[in-house]
Amino acid sequence: MSETLTGAQALIRALELEGVDVIFGVPGGAILPAYDPLLDSPMRHVLARHEQGAGHMASGYAHASGRVGVMMATSGPGATNLITPLQDAHMDSIPVVAITGQVATRSIGNDAFQEAHTWGISMPCTKHNYLVTDPNDIPDVVREAFHLAATGRPGPVLVDLPKDILAGTMTWHRAGELSLPGYRPSVKGHPKQVKAAVDLILHSARPVLYAGGGIIRADAADELRRFAEMANTPTVTTLMARGAIPDSHPLAMGMPGMHGNYAAITAMQKSDLLIAVGARFDDRVTGDTTTFAPEARIIHVDVDPAEIGKVRAVDVPIVGDAKAVLAQLIATMQKALGDGAAPERAEWFATLRGWQEEHPLHYHQEPEGPIQQQYVIEELHRLTGGNAIVVAGVGQHQMWASQFWGFERPRTWVNSGGLGTMGYAVPAAIGAKAAMPEETVFAIDGDGCFQMTMQELITAATEGIPVKIAVMNNESLGMVKQWQNLFYDGRLSAVEFGSAAPDYVKLAEAMGCAGLRAEHPDDVTPALEKALAINDRPVVVEFRCDPGAMVFPMVPAGGSNDAIVLSIEDLA
Amino acid sequence: MSQHHVISVLVENKPGVLARIASMFARRGFNIHSLAVGPTAEPEMSRITLVVDGPEMEQIIKQLYKLVHVVKVTEMMPADGVEREVMLLRITADSERRGEILDAAGIFEAKAVDVGVKTITFELSGTPAKLADFLELMRPYGIVDLVKSGRIALTKDAKTRNGRPKLRSA
Ligand SMILES: Cc1ncc(C[n+]2csc(CCOP(=O)(O)OP(=O)(O)O)c2C)c(N)n1
């Protein structure tokens, strides 16, 4: 018997068939039909206070779990509010699907109430997008959307659904065979290239394994570690790859790039072979490309062929999924080594150790204050044993969190790397916690970032999603202030908040959260202990931090990685 | 002219596919010199022929392939392909020079498609070079108006490229 459903019912059923358990969204006129059958669905709907929040929640969910995150919004302003999270997910290759309402098909193009050209607006910030014009297409479109979001290089996909399509009827059917003749992502690397890569690696004296966010996306952390060990290569993890290899591993070198550690940056600079896997030679990693790693030959493994050769010419390109290609590299290297081992490279490792000892990441906490953010991060790490998902906003606090948190597992670091979206942390933490309720989810947020999306804590409190947020209050847009101090003669323009407002403890309480404050270094540990003990509601802990602190090391934007600024004295 | 490359893009015939390509070019800062879209022998596919500028061919092709509805991208070297443009050209042609102009046009096999009191309009199809030559020849008479199609192209049959005798010259 054929079953007649509304488009909206078909949508909800198709989402259920994709295994969706949570949808983050805000309803409105055009998407109304979809919210009705949602009432009868086992899927949970988390009502965000702003669609941007819903979008970052979906992204935090996907970041932490690896499953596709789903956001939903109405037409016009609802859809445009999703644009920032979509572009954010696009830059960081996060698998999310956005469902948006649209005005009825007969009204499209007439400047109808709450009409926006969502398909056109979202085109450059999605991997692919759809405007559905027949309710019978819904099962196939939803199947394709999830497939595209999750496979190949993951990314955001948007499905725009006019109101009459949602309200109209269709004959229910499951999605048919995928018909995507133009979409054939490579999984396995070319064996000849894999062999060439192994040869280069075994003959290299100063290799560096350059691990990018693709390792996390591909769930390839185990393969990465095994490959690094077998090939005996020091391994750097970019901002998006923190946790790809345990920071406690003897081969782990930490983060390279603009605020990376000296040894990681310099290892890349001086290497004779960079093995990039799931990394894209981002300008925040390479600095000035003309002086970047001048002696290095390049092996580049990426699932997206367009990344290979985009920034840096490549000696051995390998198109394929990071997990599959690393497995091939392991097998091929095993064969090449036989009973032997990879080169010892004693001299190279001694050099690296020398750099690490000479220029470690460091900070100093004066016992009487002010509080240094690095101290808060290290204390939190000690108290949790590193066992938490850490989420960050964008700015100084993000860099310190990445530098000073010892990451031991993949998917425990959730941040906005490519787009650098302030306001990411609070909603992303909520999404991460919704996906992984057993984990402690602790956001390290800046006071500027927090004020952009903090209202989502109301969502967290009402929905019973007990995230923990550390607000690093330096009374300023710290990272921008740092640049003004360093590059604009200290002329501070529009970066200081002053200390008059807000009262974060009262704010937290008003939003249904616990509110705590630490003003003195001695307050830090008790405040964190208290925050960790509260699990029945979200917690906000304000740390009154040093407003003058700066993040080092630093390679000024566009500068050469040969000229690492280690402290303010280097610039004098 | 040497900077120009011709690429032939086989796409799924879906609404908005041209917008996707144009948007990608705009976003990546690539330049489109000319563009022609039309059906192919298969109704579910269209072919877009692009003439593009610049040294970034590899990126352009890879970025095109990232578009879900792009099925195949072929870059055509001038020797590999048959390239054609169509031009409509209206020139000043008073009665004294009309004969002379028609003679010249005859050599190019340009067709007079409209004749007015003071002008003649020619239709000419051919390689871009042939059109350029014809234009230069007509310029001294006074060009009133001109329109050109985007370039269309197909790769030559493999037989002709492998050095076998050509059945017909381009
Ligand atoms: C949405 C958005 N607007 C502006 C910026 C530019 N920006 C980068 S870091 C930063 C300051 C962030 O301040 P805060 O959250 O207090 O963090 P801090 O740097 O002080 O740790 C700004 C304004 C941005 N990244 N995102």
Image (cartoon, rainbow, N blue to C red):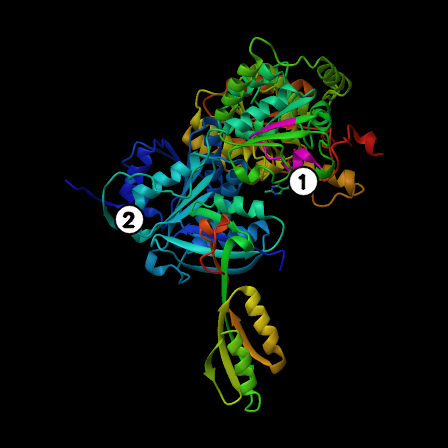
Q: Are marks 1 and 2 on the same chain?
A: yes
Tell me: B28 left or right of B42: right
Q: Are marks 1 and 2 in contact (CB under 8 Å)?
A: no
Q: Nearer the viewer, residue A417 or A188?
A: A188
The extreme front residue here reads: B165
**Quadrant of residue B144 in the image?**
bottom right
Tell me: A468 left or right of A5: right
The extreme left residue here reads: A1
Query: What residue lies at 71% left-to-right and 12% top-to-bottom?
Result: A346
Q: Position of residue A183 (x, y in %)?
A: 42, 41
Q: Quadrant of ligand 1?
A: top right
Callout 2: chain: A
Q: Position of residue A246 (x, y in %)?
A: 58, 17
Q: Nearer the viewer, residue A350 or A550?
A: A350
Can you tell which of label 1 and label 2 is closer to the viewer?
2
**The residue carrying mark 1 has its beta carbon less than 8 Å from ligand 1:** yes
Question: Which residue range is magenta in the image?
Answer: A274-287
Query: What residue lies at 37% left-to-right and 40% top-to-bottom?
Result: A144
Tell me the distance, in whole angstroms, between the alpha carbons under discs 1 and 2: 50 Å
Tell me: A153 left or right of A276: left
Q: Which quadrant, please, contains the N terminus of chain B?
A: bottom right
Residue A539 in sight in this render = no
Residue linked to disc 2: A135
